[in-house]
C-alpha cells in the first residue's frame, strides 16, 4: 500500500513537471524568439555565444527607450544586437570619447570610452523613426557610427533583448 502511494505521488509530480515544462515551452516559442550573440561588441553585458530571449511584442505597445538592448535586422538581412543611445528627433555627436545628445553629455556606465567617433564626429540628426545604436564595447563594435550601418529604422528593430538563458551560470535579466 505504501509503495503504491509513493508511486502515485511520483507520477503526479512527473505529470506536473511535464505540464509546467510544456506551458513554459509554449509561452517562450509563442511570444519570444531566441538569438545567439556573435562577436564581442556587447561585452561585458553580453558575450559571444550567449543565448538570449527576444521579446518581439513589447514594441507593439511601447516605443523603444534609451539604453534598451535590441535585436535588429541590418540592411544585409542579418540580425545583430546593440544598445539604443539616440532616439527619434535627437542629435547625436561624439566628442573626446563621450556621447552628447542634443548638446548634453550622456552620463552612462554602459559604454566603454569611444576612441573612433565615425560619422558621429559631426552631428547626426535622427529622423522621425530613426535610432542611433552603439555596442557596449565600442572599440569592437560595428554600429551606427559607421556608414555601412548608420541609423536604424524602427521597422528594422525585431524586439527587445530581455533575458540571457545560456550559459546557465550567467542566467540574468538584460537591461
Image (cartoon, grey):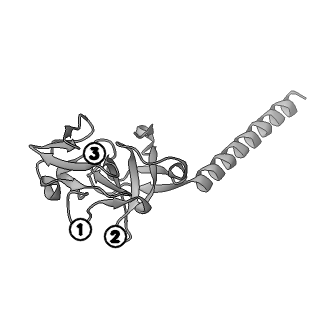
Can you tell which mark lies on residue 148?
Answer: 1
Name the N-terminal-most of marks 2 and 1: 2
Left or right for 82, reference 96 = right
Q: Residue placed at 46% from the left, 44% from the top?
A: 162
Which mark's residue is nearer the viewer, 2 or 3?
2
Relative image position of residue 32 (x, y in whole percent): 55, 53
Residue 62 drawn above or below residue 1: below
Find disc 3 in the rendering and name its residue.
43
CA distance for labels 2 and 3: 23 Å
Which residue lies most toward the bottom here?
76
CA distance for labels 1 and 3: 22 Å
In this view, the residue in front, 8 or 142, is: 142
CA distance for labels 2 and 1: 9 Å
Q: Helix, strand or loop at disc 3? A: loop
Find disc 2 in the rendering and name its residue.
75
Relative image position of residue 71 (x, y in whole percent): 41, 55
Question: Would you call the spot at circle 2 few (<14 residues within 10 Å), some (14-19), or many (20 or more)?
Answer: few
Q: Residue placed at 83% from the left, 36% from the top?
A: 8
Amino acid at each position: 500500500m505504501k509503495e503504491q502511494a509513493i508511486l502515485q505521488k511520483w507520477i503526479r509530480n512527473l505529470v506536473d513537471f511535464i505540464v509546467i515544462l510544456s506551458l513554459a515551452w509554449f509561452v517562450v516559442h509563442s511570444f519570444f524568439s531566441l538569438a545567439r550573440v556573435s562577436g564581442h561588441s556587447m561585452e561585458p553585458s553580453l558575450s559571444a555565444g550567449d543565448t538570449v530571449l527576444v521579446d518581439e511584442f513589447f514594441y507593439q505597445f511601447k516605443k523603444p527607450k534609451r539604453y534598451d538592448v535590441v535585436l535588429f535586422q541590418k540592411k544585409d538581412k542579418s540580425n545583430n544586437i546593440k544598445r539604443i543611445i539616440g532616439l527619434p528627433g535627437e542629435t547625436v555627436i561624439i566628442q573626446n570619447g563621450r556621447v552628447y545628445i542634443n548638446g548634453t553629455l550622456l552620463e552612462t556606465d554602459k559604454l566603454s570610452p569611444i576612441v573612433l567617433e565615425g560619422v558621429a564626429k559631426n552631428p547626426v540628426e535622427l529622423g522621425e523613426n530613426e535610432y542611433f545604436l552603439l555596442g557596449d564595447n565600442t572599440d569592437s563594435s560595428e554600429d551606427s557610427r559607421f556608414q555601412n550601418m548608420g541609423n536604424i529604422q524602427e521597422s528594422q528593430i525585431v524586439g527587445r533583448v530581455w533575458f540571457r538563458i545560456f550559459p546557465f551560470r550567467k542566467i540574468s535579466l538584460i537591461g
